[in-house]
Image (cartoon, rainbow, N blue to C red):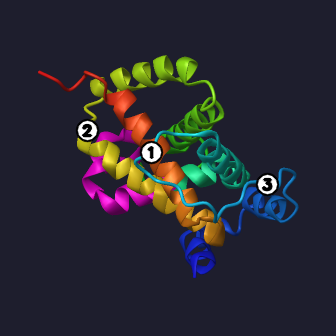
């Protein structure tokens, strides 16, 4: 089951006080999901609408309660599982204790998840979000990020969300995230890769 998979991926974190607090906070979530996660279906090829945004924002609020460090670690574990060569792009991934407190990777994964959370919070204000994503995309060109890397990261994010959300990661929820990721990719890549 998804719950077992999530626990298996994070078994090494179960000994930490932060993780225990994060898991306890999910039991009494202060912002319940009010949107129907199952109906109607979400067409991944249709324009992003308010329901899609609600699906993403409300389910991400659940995931975010795990904390950016935990969520980020799972995303990056999925990235490195799908593309082991990606570790070469992250100097912190070569550290002996790459996930340790104060490590470069810990700082990086927290920053990535906080950026993702900010972008998700801005989905109802795309005119303000677009320049942020364009700047982020340009910055990543300088890091050697290629268009194919967006597919790896998107896949890792989707896999992480599926694990964290369990039965709440329905087909409409998945498709809403895919729509959002499509916007992120298109906007971040912009004209940066055209010759």
Closer to viewer: mark 2 or mark 1: 1
Q: Main secondary structure of the magenta part?
A: helix
- Depth check: give the residue in front, 189 or 44: 44
Disc 2 to disc 3: CB gap under 8 Å: no
> SS for tag 1?
loop
Q: Residues within 10 Å of mark 1 (few under 14, many from 20)?
A: few
Task: Report which residue position mark 1 lands on.
Answer: 46
Q: Residue furthest left?
A: 195
For the point 53% across and 65% down, the residue is 171
Eyeballing the image, is 81 above or below 100? below
The image shows residue 121 at horizontal and vertical percentages of: 66, 34
Front-lying residue, 146 or 55: 55
Q: How far apart, in angstroms, are the residues tagged by discs 2 and 1?
A: 22 Å
- Pointer 2 or 1: first along the chain: 1
- Asked if residue 83 is positioned above or below residue 115 in the image, the reply reads below
The region drawn magenta spans 75-94
Please give the name of the residue rendered at 62% of the width and 54% of the height, measured from the top-left corner.
70
Give SS at disc 2. Answer: helix
Circle nearer the viewer, 2 or 3: 3
Judged left or right of residue 111, residue 93 is left
Quadrant for residue 40, please give it.
Answer: bottom right
Residue located at (63% from left, 30% from top):
124
- Check the picture and name the quadrant holding the N terminus: bottom right
Residue name at image x 24 percent, y 36 percent: 146
Residue named by callout 2: 147
């Amino acid at each position: 089951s998804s719950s077992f998979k999530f626990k298996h991926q994070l078994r090494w974190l179960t000994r930490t006080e932060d993780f225990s607090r994060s898991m306890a906070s999910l039991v009494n979530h202060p912002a319940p999901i009010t949107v129907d996660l199952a109906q109607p279906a979400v067409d991944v090829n249709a324009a992003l609408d308010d329901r899609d945004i609600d699906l993403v924002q409300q389910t991400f609020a659940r995931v975010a309660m795990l904390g950016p460090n935990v969520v980020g670690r799972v995303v990056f574990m999925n990235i490195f599982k799908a593309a082991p060569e990606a570790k070469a792009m992250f100097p912190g991934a070569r550290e002996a204790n790459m996930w340790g407190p104060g490590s470069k990777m810990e700082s990086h994964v927290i920053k990535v998840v906080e950026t993702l959370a900010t972008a998700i919070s801005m989905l109802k204000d795309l005119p303000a979000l677009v320049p942020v994503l364009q700047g982020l995309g340009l910055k990543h060109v300088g890091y050697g990020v290629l268009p194919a890397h967006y597919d790896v990261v998107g896949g890792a994010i989707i896999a992480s969300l599926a694990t964290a959300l369990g039965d709440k990661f329905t087909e409409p929820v998945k498709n809403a995230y895919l729509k959002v990721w499509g916007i992120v990719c298109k906007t971040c890549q912009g004209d940066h890769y055209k010759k």
